[in-house]
Image (spheres, rainbow, N blue to C red):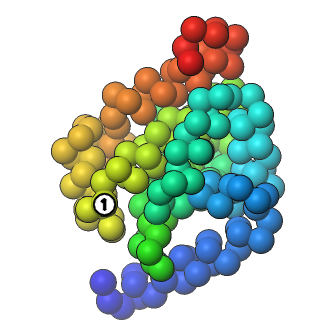
Amino acid sequence: MRGPKALAVAALTVFVMAGSTAAEPAGLSHVRGLNPASRKLIAEALERSAIIRGLVDALEGTDVVVYVRLDLFEHQTKSGYLSFLATAGGSRYVVVKIDCLAFTNQRIATLGHELQHALEVASAPQVRDVRTFAAFYSEVGWGTAAGKYETDLARQTGRRVELELAGFRSVM
């Protein structure tokens, strides 16, 4: 990739990598909030969900770093999604965006859903850029109307988190 697009990706990568690591608590190096609201969401999710804790623990042993950002979604077709950002320094970086207007339990369930996608990426060493990310999800999942990809396991994980937050103990 060359030109203005490559420069923009490089600048965004430097911004994201420099901007979030200093404020992260020890032990969460692979799941990082990009602002106070997303860090608060991660902390609440870890406190309330054993499933989320398991996903974060599993990500800690991988080369995938997940940045979490709460965002205002223009279209309400999804409550969150994962995008591939970059590969640098032996790590692969992805961004999870979650609808800031969703209720807290929905944001936490969406985080679980998207962290499952991050683990799917972690299990696929061939995913190194946007092109291989799309090829991987074309193979293991299916495209959605919003131009994103979906998998059964991520859907199941999000649903399990929803049930866990509602107090159903048998889902773990």
Residue 116 vs 4, above or below: the answer is above
Residue 94 visible? The answer is no
SS class of the residue under badge 1? loop
Pinpoint residue 129: horizontal percent, then vertical percent: 33, 68
Residue 166 vs 120, above or below: the answer is above
Pinpoint residue 172: horizontal percent, then vertical percent: 56, 18
The residue that appears at 55% across and 14% down in the rendered structure is 171
Pinpoint residue 148: horizontal percent, then vertical percent: 35, 46
Residue 31 vs 166, above or below: the answer is below
Give the image quarter of residue 109. Answer: top right
Few, some or many residues within 10 Å of mark 1 (<14, 14–19, 20+): few
Q: Which residue is mark 1?
A: 125
Give the image quarter of residue 161. Answer: top right
Q: Is residue 154 shown left or right of residue 128?
A: right
Q: Is residue 87 shown left or right of residue 162?
A: left
Q: For this rendering, which residue is in front, 72 or 138?
A: 138
The residue that appears at 71% across and 44% down in the rendered structure is 42
The residue that appears at 46% across and 35% down in the rendered structure is 77
* Count of numbered circles in the view: 1
The residue that appears at 66% across and 49% down in the rendered structure is 70
Pinpoint residue 73: horizontal percent, then vertical percent: 57, 46
**Hey, what amino acid is under mark 1?**
Pro
Q: Is residue 4 shown left or right of residue 170?
A: left
Residue 52 visible? The answer is yes
The N terminus - image quarter: bottom left
Looking at the image, the residue that sits furthest to the front is 61
